């Protein structure tokens, strides 16, 4: 059944549907739904029972008078008021004596409509109670009844309360006396015009204004003075709020100024730090590269000063390519828990590579090969960069030079004795991207150079291929290396 469905929304819609139908046959199911743990469902159930008006719901509604939610208690009183079942009288009187203000008021009205002698039932209980705000609220309710006993009790209680030590009790009593509109309330209200507490004087003047009685000129003047004072107090309060608003605005401006000063100080620190890092990089200090690039990446991430980043900082890095290339390669190979930002970081660093001179090609190519074939470098594969149409040919050339550099390092290590698997992976990658056709001319040029100049001219041989001074050159005998690579490449096919 929908009323027992595990989903709250379905149960709520079921109750609303039954409320709309108003079918007495649904009362039993609705009564069972009063046990639902959801407040809005219980409230909707009570409203439905109120509209169906079936006496069978009287007992469960009496139970709802003790619900922890005031809205449900209030709606239960209204429902009992509609049903008018005699069984509800005692529980409603209990609500009248112990409930909250709104619930008491509704309970009193329900009892009046049920023609219950409220005065006889309630007044004896109230006479034994000390003067409290609760008793004053009862007096207010009783004072609005047509029963003379209730009015007499209410007036007597409120007149005493108008002289109470507690100014809040006096204010409540004066307000209630003005609502009762009994001739006996005039004198205590006039006396309250001279109360030492402003809220009581204010309430007394308003209450006397509501009474249709004749007052002498002195009393009228006093009422006018109090009401005028009320206007002046409101104006002063408005001015105070205006001044408070001005103070708040001044505080806001001061905070903004302080924030701006802090940001300027921070910017100066960052500028000074950036300038210091620039000088270190310019002098060839590779340890300054990573902090400087991380600073640029942070600016890129938070959208700070991106114009200067691309127009000044990136060209500065490119100008110092020999100092920055190895630290940048290290950064690219690092992982980052933020996958999205890791990709942005890679793209930014790759943008720096786009602008680097040809002397950086071997190291860039070697990095591409490492990323593409090394399973220990996660998150980023070289293929997306390798196949970028804008720089495809350039990257193929870099791959060939990077492969040559890696082969040099492998040859230095063991003369290719135990590295056949790694060499095959490199050749496979070159073939996949059509880079073997770029590697072959490099090998021929290198071989021709060694033939012409001798094996001991290794440094010049590498410089002649555009490797510059970034790498350590292959020591002699160079022709043996070239022969071995060309042999392996031919065998690879």
Image (tube, grey):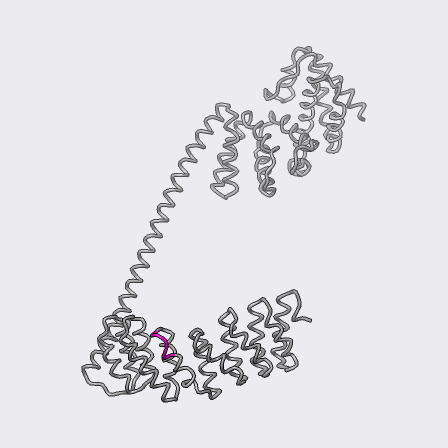
Left or right of residue 343: residue 173 = left
Q: Where is residue 452 drawn, in percent x and y?
A: 69, 12
In the picture as drawn, the residue positioned furthest to the front comes out as 128
Q: Which residues are magenta?
A: 126-131
Q: Is residue 319 above or below residue 206?
A: above
Q: Main secondary structure of the magenta part?
A: loop
Q: Is residue 116 above or below residue 370?
A: below
Task: Kindly indicate the quadrant of the structure image that contains residue 15.
Answer: bottom right
Which residue is rendered at x = 81% and y = 23% of the image?
491
Left or right of residue 217: residue 472 = right
Q: Where is residue 345 drawn, in percent x and y?
A: 57, 38
In the picture as drawn, the residue positioned furthest to the left comes out as 218
Q: Who is closer to the viewer here, 230 or 23?
A: 23
Q: Is residue 161 above or below residue 333?
A: below
In the image, residue 487 lies in the stretch drawn in magenta: no
Q: Who is closer to the viewer here, 328 or 236?
A: 236
Left or right of residue 139: residue 47 = right
- Marker count (numbered): 0
Q: Is residue 188 above or below residue 308?
A: below
Which quadrant is home to the C terminus?
Answer: top right
Task: Kindly indicate the quadrant of the structure image that contains residue 206.
Answer: bottom left
Q: Who is closer to the viewer here, 230 or 418?
A: 230
Which residue is rendered at x = 73% and y = 28% of the image?
426
Which quadrant is home to the N terminus?
Answer: bottom right
Q: Where is residue 141 drawn, in percent x and y?
A: 39, 81
Q: Where is residue 315 drawn, in percent x and y?
A: 52, 32
């Amino acid at each position: 059944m929908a009323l027992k469905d595990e989903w709250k929304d379905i149960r709520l819609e079921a109750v609303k549907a039954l409320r709309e139908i108003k079918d007495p046959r649904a009362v039993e199911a609705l009564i069972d739904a009063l046990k639902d743990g959801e407040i809005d469902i219980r409230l909707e159930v009570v409203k439905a029972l109120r509209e169906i008006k079936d006496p069978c719901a009287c007992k469960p509604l009496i139970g709802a008078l003790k619900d922890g939610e005031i809205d449900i208690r209030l709606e239960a009183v209204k429902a009992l008021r509609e049903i008018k079942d005699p069984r509800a009288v005692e529980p409603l009187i209990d609500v009248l004596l112990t409930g909250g203000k709104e619930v008491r008021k509704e309970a009193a009205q329900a009892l009046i409509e049920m023609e219950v002698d409220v005065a006889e039932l309630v007044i004896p209980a109230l006479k034994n109670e000390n003067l409290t705000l609760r008793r004053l609220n009862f007096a207010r309710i009783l004072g609005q009844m047509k029963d003379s006993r209730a009015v007499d009790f209410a007036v007597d209680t409120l007149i005493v309360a108008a002289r109470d030590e507690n100014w809040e009790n006096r204010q409540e009593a004066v307000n209630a006396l003005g609502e009762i509109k009994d001739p006996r309330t005039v004198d205590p209200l006039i006396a309250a015009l001279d109360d030492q507490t402003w809220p009581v004087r204010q309430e007394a003047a308003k209450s006397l204004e509501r009474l249709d009685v004749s007052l002498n000129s002195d009393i009228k003047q006093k009422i006018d003075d109090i009401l005028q004072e009320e206007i002046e107090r409101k104006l002063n309060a408005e001015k105070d709020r205006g001044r408070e608003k001005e103070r708040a605005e001044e505080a806001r401006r001061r905070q903004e100024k302080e924030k701006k000063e802090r940001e300027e100080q921070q910017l100066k620190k960052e500028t000074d730090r950036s300038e210091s890092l620039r000088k270190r990089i310019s002098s060839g200090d590779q340890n300054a590269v990573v902090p400087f690039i991380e600073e640029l990446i942070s600016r890129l991430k938070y959208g700070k000063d991106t114009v200067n980043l691309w127009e000044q900082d990136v060209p500065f890095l490119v100008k110092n390519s020999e100092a920055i290339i190895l630290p940048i390669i290290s950064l690219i190979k690092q992982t980052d828990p933020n996958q999205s930002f890791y990709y942005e970081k890679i793209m930014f660093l790759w943008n720096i590579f786009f602008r680097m001179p040809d002397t950086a090609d071997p190291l860039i190519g070697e990095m591409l090969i490492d990323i593409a074939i090394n399973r220990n470098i996660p998150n980023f594969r070289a293929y997306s960069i390798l196949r970028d149409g804008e720089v495809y040919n350039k990257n193929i050339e870099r791959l060939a030079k990077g492969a040559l550099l890696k082969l040099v390092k492998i040859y230095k290590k063991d003369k290719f004795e135990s590295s056949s698997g790694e060499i095959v992976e490199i050749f496979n990658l070159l073939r996949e991207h059509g880079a073997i056709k770029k590697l072959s001319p490099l090998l021929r040029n290198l071989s021709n150079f060694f033939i012409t100049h001798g094996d001991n001219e290794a440094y010049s041989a590498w410089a002649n291929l555009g490797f510059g001074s970034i790498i350590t050159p292959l020591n002699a005998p160079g022709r043996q290396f070239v022969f071995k690579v060309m042999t392996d490449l031919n065998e690879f096919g």
